Image (spheres, helix red, strand yellow):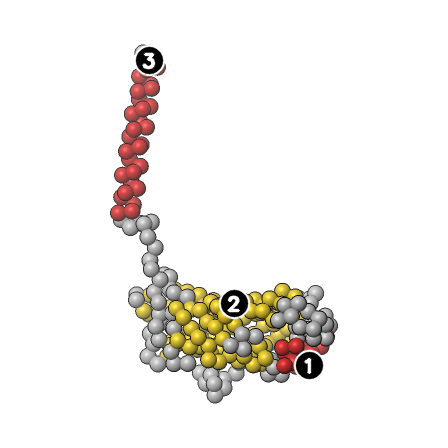
Amino acid sequence: MHSHRKLGSSRAIMIAIAIVIPITTIGVFAAGGMASAASPVTFKGNISCSLTGTVTFSTPLKLGVSQPAIRATFKGKNVDCTGIKGTKLTQGGETLKSSTEDFTFTIAANKAGGCDGLATMTSPPITGATVNWVGTSPITATKLSFKAGTITSAGLITYGSGTATGSFAGTAKVQLQSSEISELGTTKLIPYTAANAAAACKKPGISDITFVQPKPSSTYPKNDNEEIGPLF
């Protein structure tokens, strides 16, 4: 009889737990605690930012040697973003604070080497570049695509007439200044100049390039270098 009473007590506890758990769960979802996440806010209008970052190459760029297709990965961030032409950076109760940006592109196989683009003054097209906007709650990312751009002997890369979808949908343009070179097999950074780039391309090869914001120009008079929205 003693053991029977203990078994009955255990059953009562288990039944009580089985009742309490679903009631508690219903209460949490009814309160909206974990039931759903806030929907991202899609920003509209025009934004101007200062973009910096680094491109890393899957195979170091070289000149004068046959190379297969090379995958290039850009990782960057935007700072000092401002809304222009009346665009507010608080929309739908969300305030945009900063952003990160990343994309990959392919440098086609070339018997003359991966540095050939530096010599021909062309930069590859970009598709699906992602700008991840940072705020206190989710913001719809922007997807950018550009046709082939240009690169000067001083390492100034320009992409114009790009397209933008998601937040700040419309068009886009960006300009980046090559700043430093990292050679294969070393962590030492070398200032970007035409002579330094040519020497590194010959030997041992360029493993990554750091890009900064160019000096103000007629294209970007406000000292920014990336503009996104329907006006550009």
* Eye-nearest disc, 2 or 3: 2
Evaluate if marks 2 and 3 touch, with contact meaning CB atoms under 8 Å apart. Answer: no
* Residue 103 circle label: 2
Q: Which residue is mark 1?
A: 195
Q: CA distance from mark 1 to mark 3?
A: 94 Å
Q: Which of the image's four quarters has the C terminus?
A: bottom left
Residue 196 left/right relative to 225: right
Whether residues under marks 1 and 2 lie with C-beta atoms below 8 angstroms apart, the answer is no
Any mark on residue 120, and which?
none
Which one is earlier in the sequence, the residue at label 1 or at label 2? 2
Q: Residues within 10 Å of mark 2 (few under 14, many from 20)?
A: some
Q: For residue 2, which numbered disc appears in the image? A: 3
| Image marks 1 and 3: residues in contact by CB distance under 8 Å | no
Badge 2 marks a residue whose secondary structure is strand
Tell me the quadrant of the picture where the N terminus can be found: top left
In the picture provided, is 15 more to the left or to the right than 219? left
Identify the residue at image location x=63%, y=68%: 69
Neighbours of disc 3 within 10 Å: few (<14), some (14-19), many (20+): few
Residue 96 placement (x, y as % from top left): 38, 68
Dot placed on the residue nearer the N-terminal end, 1 or 3: 3
Q: Position of residue 86 (x, y in %)?
A: 33, 79
What residue is drawn where x is 50% and y is 70%? Answer: 127
Residue at image point 41% right, 66% down = 141
Residue 145, x across and y down, in percent: 48, 73
Amino acid type at mark 2: Phe
Q: Residue at x 29, y 47 (%)?
A: 29
Q: Amino acid at mark 1?
A: Ala
* Residue 198 seen by the camera: yes
